[in-house]
Amino acid sequence: MTLDQLEIFLATAEHLHFTKAAEALYITQPAVSAAIASLESEYGVKLFHRVGRHIEITETGRLLQLEAQRILTQVTLTERGLAEFNDLQRGELQLGSSLTIGNYWLPAKISDFQERYPAIKINCTLANTEEICLGTANGRFDLALIEGEVKSDLTHCLEQEIVGSDRLLIIVGRSHPWYKREAIELPELVETPWVMRESGSGTQQRFEEALQNWGIDLRTLKVTLLLNTGEMVKAIIENSSAAAGISELMVQKELELGTLRSIRVIDTSGLYPRYLEFTRPFLKIKHRQRFQPRVCQVFEQML
């Protein structure tokens, strides 16, 4: 079994078409057919069903697809690791980041790193916390940063470390009746419409966690909109009578301009009234067992 055969097999499994696989790899269609036939003959298995002019992957093929992807990923990482041991004069870093961190906290870190190591290429993908965790578990990212929690089914393979933090704020726009107030009492939270992030968002996870810790039943909230970016949340809140929970990093400019206002929450249920606040951690995550390129280790130290 050769790496070339595995690459051809994976392309065929992706396209489910010999000619399209050949075009993707810039080789001939007979070369693709020969590679697949050689694998099937060598191990006495059937990797694809030929159905007329089409092909379908078999259960055996699905097993090989999973293992072949792992093998080729490891080869790529090993090649990168060897290439990077020359004083970081070359190399590549695959970063994943949840949206708030990637838009507001991480850019300065990347700039500092590239000033020191200009020959290193950094590819950074932004998505919600859930997608970034899955990508890190699957080997798509060398290193990732999230502000939500790692789901329990991924904690066995993902290592976590706190590298920063920020505060979550409750914000309103000029049209909201709370705008002229500095604080509200805790029970008032259920009296206003809310604009929320989608369920896979780290911001949403942490905000819901804070509300539950404060004794708020999430089912009693009047959620009118679910949006998939914080920028959309800000834009809606500026021109509506709804409220939102959002990162302090995201709204500093708007708070200075007065287009948004941060509202504090007072809990008067105890002997003494107290202001409620919530600080959330920024987590660095990486796979516990996958090979870590040297460039990844250096970037971790900078974080």
Image: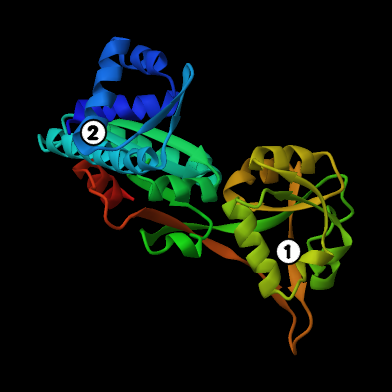
Q: Is residue 23 visible?
A: yes
The answer to whether the residue labelled 1 contacts the one labelled 2, judged by CB atoms less than 8 Å apart, is no
55 sits left or right of 269 in the view: left
Residue 43 picture location, percent across and down:
22, 38
Q: Nearer the viewer, residue 68 or 257?
A: 68
Q: Nearer the viewer, residue 143 or 88?
A: 143
The residue most toward the left is 86
- Residue found at x 76% / y 66%: 218
Q: Nearer the viewer, residue 112 or 7?
A: 7
Q: Hey, what amino acid is under mark 2?
A: Tyr
58 sits left or right of 233 in the view: left
Mark 1 closeness class: few <14, some 14–19, many ≥20 residues within 10 Å: some
Q: Hey, what amino acid is under mark 1?
A: Arg
Residue 142 picture location, percent across and down:
32, 44
Mark 2 closeness class: few <14, some 14–19, many ≥20 residues within 10 Å: some
Q: Secondary structure at mark 2?
A: loop
In what quadrant of the picture does the N terminus appear?
A: top left
Residue 90 picture location, percent across and down:
18, 29
Q: Earlier in the sequence, mark 1 or mark 2?
A: 2
Residue 217 picture location, percent across and down:
77, 71
Look at mark 2 in the image and give the residue it sits on: 117
Look at mark 1 in the image and give the residue it sits on: 264
Q: Is residue 283 above or below residue 3?
A: below
Q: CA distance from mark 1 to mark 2?
A: 43 Å
Q: Secondary structure at mark 1?
A: strand
Q: Is residue 214 above or below residue 10?
A: below
127 sits left or right of 293 in the view: right
Residue 155: name its quadrant. Answer: bottom left
- Residue found at x 41% / y 15%: 20
Q: Is residue 26 visible?
A: no
Which mark's residue is nearer the viewer, 1 or 2?
2
